[in-house]
Image (cartoon, coloured by chain):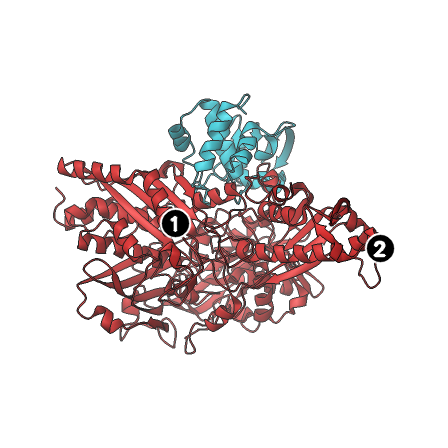
Chain colours: A cyan, B red
Amino acid sequence: MKITVNVDGVRYEDDVEPRLLLVHYLREQAGRTGTPIGCDTSNCGACTVLMNGMSVKSCSVLAVQADGAEITTIQGLANGQLHPLQQAFHEEHALQCGYCTPGMIMAAADLLRDNPHPTEEQVRDGLEGNLCRCTGYQNIVRAVLRAAGSAGVTA
Amino acid sequence: MTTETVQAEVGKARLRKEDARLITGQTNWTDNISLPGQVTVAFVRSPYAHARITGVDVSAAKEAPGVIAVFSGADLAAEQGSLPCAWPVTEDIVMPAHPPMAVDTVRYAGEIVAAVVARDRYAAADALELVDVSYEPLEPVLDMQAAIADGSVKVHEAGNKSFTWTLENGDMAAAFRDAPVVVDRVYRQQRLIPCAMEPRAVVCAPVGDEYTMWTSTQIPHVLRIMLALVTGIGEHQLRVIAPDVGGGFGSKLQVTAEEVLALLLARRLGRPVKWTESRSEGNVAVHHGRDQIQHIRVAADADGRLRGLSVDLLADMGAYLMLVTPGVPLLGAFMFNAIYKMDAYRFNCTGVFTTKTPTDAYRGAGRPEATYAIEHIMDDLAAELGVDPLELRERNWIKHEEFPYTTIAGLTYDSGNYEAATAQARSLFGYDELRAEQAARAAAGDKVRLGIGVSTFTEMCGLAPSRVLGSLRYAAGGWEHATIRMLPTGKVEVVTGTSPHGQGHETAWSQIVADQLGVPFEDVRVLHGDTQVAPKGMDTYGSRSLTNGGAALVAACAKVREKARIIAAGMLEVAPEDLEWDAGRWAVRGDPDQGKSIGEISFAAFAAHALPDGVEPSLDSDATYDPDNFSFPHGTHLCAVEVDTETGAVHIRSYVAVDDVGVVINPLIVEGQVHGGIAQGIAQALYEEAEYDSSGNLISATLADYLVPSAADLPTLVTARTTTPSTGNPLGVKGVGEAGTIASTPAVVNAIIDALRPLGVTDVPMPCTPPRVWRAINEAGAGR
């Protein structure tokens, strides 16, 4: 099937199998390997991207469902300078191996769009769909709260 | 000024160099690699825990669109060798052959029986379905005690017992004879799945008779040697690269079937081969961790002084011995006695084969198991004696003035201060206030009980003195290697034999070298994880990288400085003895304005126009460091839980961790390691278990069933440190990678039991889920 997708500001027209997952499309056809895959049951959230501004797990979306959509991946988040969430993740040491980080940042971007000034508990609950094995989440929560305190946080 | 500059970097909370690529998606995970001509492999895995393979029909799969080749075990039998076990712990250990692809028998659900090579992952996945494997099912062997009983079905021809290993010191009979108190318990370490967030992936590319393998591994150096030994391909023809690696926790401390098969298939097909696992595949195929039955007995005097400790373990090896499978429980053998003094100790461990996924190292490897058992029984003993659990520990622990102290298990702890860590933890936690609240609520009949858990742990880190490893029959040494390359412009390349996968070595190593050479942090670049770039190393596991790799850096930097001194002396026309090192430059003693910086000396060495006679034009140096002893981080972790006796729900109310990891290079990184470690230990206590059904299928094979905790499931931790430098290495460091995991599991479980002890509960099997807690309360007969 033919699809037209805007990925990180670039327009792509591609022929794809109807069963192709969006995450495989992004990684293997659009060459956006910044979005990793961590599971096959949509539990881990490593592959989270923004689709028309809302976070989705790109393993649970078919590429054909993204026809006409605007996709933002971790690689399209910085706009000349690091996004406040990227900066906050760096400053709060909110990543170790970094594998969950792209999904965690994209999920947090959507969380803050929805609720620009969350409490710690709201951050914890809001990121429930994203798993990290390294950090124990404490610094991730700190980073999201820190980004929430800085200007221009919405993606 | 000198001292200030020299110590400028170590101890600083430097933000990590690694982050720049990781937060922007510019990463190089193995699964991102795509080479010209690359094909994809997918594996057919056994759905049976135990079966004879009676036929593998690959004809239909071969005809499927996009399929390049299909292989069964029989096709590869002549060349595939046997996956290695490097730790034959006893002379008479049973170490069965372990073909990377099963040929005639499968011994766990998930074992590889065929490989499909296709143009892409979708074509390969489609063709997997068409491989027709016939099995004659055999009875699974799922219970360790039944496995070693007479008449059990055999997992291997030689039987289900792999080895029995024993350690004994002191007069056990005297210790237990007429002991006023004996506590006798059986604890269970459930089976766990490491679940690094990055599933494994391998790309192997042949060029002529040479092979490059990119793989998601903790051990590129060990892997290269093992691939050579298993396949017969020359070590010099193999290059192994660990690119960005998304966590390991021991699970990537392995020589895997998939790596060996990728190499063999690349050789067969003459083109790059790639394999990426799915999470569900990884959960059955990546080695599991823990899984022990622990029979522990402690004898004490009436005042609680420990007399003797006896430990009998059954350790589930799973179906085969992997790289260090049998050695994992042995690392625990030296840790059951923990921080306590006692008269006698006996440890006995039997390794048992079952038809389950093989076990091997998982964060802590042997030490969390030991720490759980001893800290649990210390609480049980305290209850028996009616003594406060912290008080009981204090009566038995090694006092800070008694170090160095040789323990009953034979290790010499170089340093420690359990009093200091405990005092700080007690005060941060508000121990006395919480005890008062606990008593008041119990008296008031509160259905939600408060419990307080104690864990005063230590661990042996810095694996390891090579001689000790040799005496324990491990096949390799425990040294670490470093090279310093001084670039002509004064920048520094550090080549390390450690192989980080989240630990931040690029940052911490830069800090160490910046101080050692007096160069800016920003001028140092750390290279690792590629056997062609970093040809020597023992890799990263067992909290060893800093103690050993860091010490190697210090030694290599010292050599650079000495070479630089000779060249600087020539430049300044003075004798080398007349120079002194001062924050990055060699200066004339008594005339500090006369000097040459390490950068100037580097350029002079590069130009080589006027070097003293006989001096080589290079400052580059390397060093290999073999430790004399382990290091012994310790700490006191205190946990308060609220247990709802009507629902069994457990809520962690507060958690305080005071760790002593010696000198800290980067407090930010140390704190992060402690957080993550504690989270993993809490996960064992409350959430995670690899569960098998009665036919031997893993029923927690997805992340929907295997409950890795999320941010919503974990508490905010309070962490602090005491600093008692290690005397065993030049940096005074001890290692921190496993501390949190080792300490936290018993802290949480002890808290739960502490809450429920008045109801008659003495144990809750892990993970302490609401149904299990509820059942424990009701079985104790006092639930309502």
Chain letter of the residue carrying label 2: B
Residue at the image point whose x is 36% and y is 38% from the top = B715
State the quadrant of the N terminus of chain B: top right
At label 2, counting other C-alpha atoms closer than 10 Å, the crowd grade (few under 14, some 14-19, many 20 or more) is: some
The residue at the point 23 percent across, 60 percent down is: B185
Disc marking residue B635: 1
Q: Secondary structure at mark 2?
A: loop
Q: Secondary structure at mark 1?
A: strand
B490 left or right, relative to B165: right
- Is residue B433 depicted above or below B284 in this figure? above
> Where is mark 2, residue-wise?
B608
Identify the image quadrant of the C terminus of chain B. top left
- Observer-nearest of B303 and B524: B303
10 Å neighbourhood of mark 1: few (<14), some, or many (≥20)? many
Mark 2: amino acid: Ala
**Amino acid residing under circle 1:** Gly
N-terminal-most mark, 2 or 1: 2
Q: Are marks 2 and 1 on the same chain?
A: yes
Q: Where in the figure is residue A54, as x and y percent of width and height?
A: 49, 27
